[in-house]
Amino acid sequence: MEKRVALFPGSFDPFTKGHYDIVERGLKLFDEIIIAIGYNSSKQTRYFAIDEMVESINGSFTNEPRVSVITYSELTATLAQRLGARYLLRGLRNTTDFEYENSVSQVNRYLYPELETVFLITSPSYAAINSTIIREVHKYGGDVSEFLPYPLKK
């Protein structure tokens, strides 16, 4: 039987408990999940350093060998095909997320016809968590530790 490899792409700036929840639940569906931190061409700079995020995410999954973290700067569909990932894992908080993710999914499927996007609905306790809001709270000195699955470096 073919190994079910899922790619979980995103900017993860930062990686939140909502993202962590999607990976944990995804592990019930897939044999391996590759968390892929992309360099988003529409975002000029990152708030959290990408190396710090890779380290933090890896630290969150130290006891889970089926999860790995990479960075990339190419089309997600191209990366998935190159890695042999036949699935994209995505989380949906609301209908706005669905509208965006549906469009992206259609393009990815056009670029790599064997690629299936699997959507998981965000658990209710994490539905309000949003990386943009977390960055803003952190920027002005607020405590964001409740929203992250790892401690932030000072």
Image (cartoon, rainbow, N blue to C red):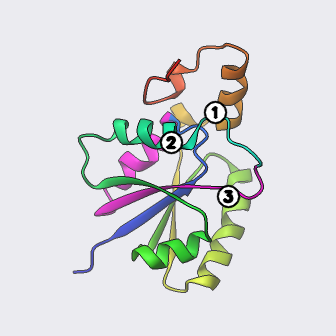
What residue appears at the point 60 percent right and 63 percent down from the top-left corner?
73
User: Callout 1: few (<14), some (14-19), or many (20+) C-alpha neighbours within 10 Å?
Assistant: some
Q: Mark 2 points at which residue?
A: 51
Q: Nearest the camera: 45 or 101?
A: 45
User: Callout 3: few (<14), some (14-19), or many (20+) C-alpha neighbours within 10 Å?
Assistant: some
Q: Earlier in the sequence, mark 1 or mark 3?
A: 3
Q: Nearer the viewer, mark 2 or mark 3?
A: 2
What residue appears at the point 45 percent right and 78 percent down from the top-left corner?
82
Q: How far is disc 1 from disc 3 in space, using C-alphas?
A: 15 Å
Residue 37 is one of the magenta-drawn residues: yes
**For residue 98, which numbered disc appears in the image?**
3
- 34 to the left or right of 51: left
- 59 to the left or right of 152: left
The quarter of the displayed image where residue 1 is located: bottom left
* SS state under label 3: helix
Q: Give the range drawn in magenta.
A: 17-43
**For residue 50, which numbered disc appears in the image?**
none
Q: What residue type is labelled 1?
A: Ala
Spot occupied by residue 140 in the image (x, y as percentages of width and height): 73, 16
Q: Which of marks 2 and 1 is nearer the N terminus?
A: 2
* SS state under label 1: loop
Q: Are marks 2 and 1 in contact (CB under 8 Å)?
A: no
Q: Name the residue under label 1.
A: 128
Q: Which amino acid does label 2 sit on?
A: Asp
Q: How far is disc 2 from disc 1 in space, using C-alphas?
A: 26 Å
